[in-house]
Image (cartoon, rainbow, N blue to C red):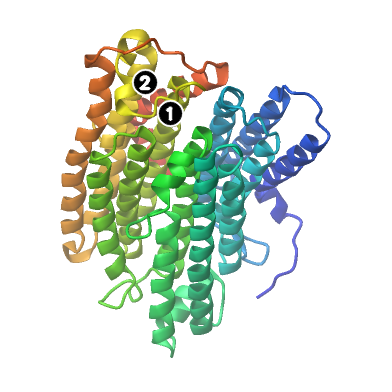
Amino acid sequence: MNFSFNPADLGYLIPYLIMAVAGMLLVLAEAFYRGQDRSSLVGLTVAGSLAAAVASVVLYRQIGDARVPLLGVMLIAARTSYVLSALFSVVTALAALMSPAHQKEHDWQIGEYYGVMLLSASGMIMLAHAANLVTIFLGIETMSIGVYVMCAMRRRSRRGNEAAMKYFLIGAFATGFLMYGMALLYGAAGTSSLVEMQKALATTNNPGLVIAGAFLLVVAFGFKVAAVPFHMWAPDAYEGAPTPVTAFMAAAVKAAAVAAMIRMFGLALGGDVLPFGSLGWASPMVVIAAVTITIGNISAVRQDNIKRMLAYSSISHAGVLLVGVCALGLGAASANGAIVYYLIAYSMTTMGAFAIVAYVGSKGRERLLVDDWAGLGAQHPGAALAMTVLLLSFGGVPPTGGFFAKFYVFKSAMEVYDGQLIWLVLVGVVNSAISIYYYLRIVTAMYFREANQPFAPTRSGGLLFVIAICPIIVLEMGIMPGFWVKLVGG
């Protein structure tokens, strides 16, 4: 394989370069920063993220249906890569807009936060373009290390420190599974290229290495997306981390991990041999998907803390995404587009929901319990309406993007040969109906119960923008899904 450097490849990597360079500059800028008002750092973060998003859109339009290998096939440029790059960039910008008001209100104004966020996002963009085991590992670790740091930035919070430590230890544990699985697959295939690996593994003389390596990767990515039974870190980490960081974790980190799974299980481990049979990787993954959807929903029903409820909801959504990954590996033609559509709808819904959580709470009272949201509809009807739209999207109720996201994923699963995943689709549909219950608990509290005391929300222009734009995007995705389906190539 030729690993020679071609300067022309950098043109296809402009979104990644913008994000990485902007992140390093922001970290350096903080070292020389003397002012208390860090609004300029926020502006640079948003500008860098939006520049990366614009570059992704331009390259998306230029590349067409081509797939261009980069840097000796370590990375690859394709339309799906740029859609995901744009998504990660936009989510990063939204997280940055959410952060200043929450930092000021809860006294954790740390300027390095913005640089670390961009560097973490650069790892996500690398995952979107990954075409080699090495770049998948580098992307995951770049993303993860930044998020470990961000979780602990509210230094005076014991719960935040506990969340960061749990997330770090579980993440390090998952990295061991990831590296060991990759090593076994490399030993069986004789190559680290995802493009060449599928054919090499299908004809290998060491099937035991393939089986063990694939199963270890199922476990590793199960930790990364918080699938059951590897989800134990998620509720505590989501609850303890600062709310903007929780939003970034729930939306961007999960989407990036799924992007890596698209590459790993759809490209390297897909095909007509590797996913099938009792020893194929799809056999444990379909079970994990069914259990994840069910346990996530049942656990969410029992939660009174909204951040923990949304954490378990996120776990359930991870199960639905695993259904899409199984369909992709098993050969469903529309699965790739369905997964990407789901990631966009889920990310926008998640960012908006956590923005409202940040808005409703104040330093004296974060209002994280369902009962604390009583009367929000009367005192702040705009925030209550936005939250209602987002909760309906989480539950998959039309006409929201969440409805069509689940519809397209389940439709792709039903395209799998001989109806192998129909039972899994039924599990997903039943659990979607169950999820409506705990989402409507919040709606009921907002509209049908009286407030105990007036709300004192955390106000800022950036936070209000996120609260306004996310429901609009979610509704637009539900009213005009055809545009987005065409965009993601479904």
Q: Note whether residue 250 is visible.
A: no
Residue 371: image x %, image y %?
29, 24
Relative horizontal placement of residue 85, taking residue 310 as reference (left or right): right
In the picture of the structure, the residue carrying the numbered disc 2 is 386
Number of marks in the rendered image: 2
In the picture of the structure, the residue carrying the numbered disc 1 is 352
- Mark 2 or mark 1, earlier in chain: 1
Q: Note whether residue 443 is visible.
A: yes
Above or below, 137 against 375 in this view is below
Query: Pointers 2 and 1 in contact (CB under 8 A)?
Result: yes
Q: Between 261 and 329, which is closer to the camera in this rendering?
A: 261
State the separation of the CA atoms marked 2 and 1.
8 Å
Q: Between 414 and 161, which is closer to the camera in this rendering?
A: 161
Q: Residue furthest bottom?
A: 205
Above or below, 76 against 154 in this view is below
Q: Residues within 10 Å of mark 2 (few under 14, many from 20)?
A: some
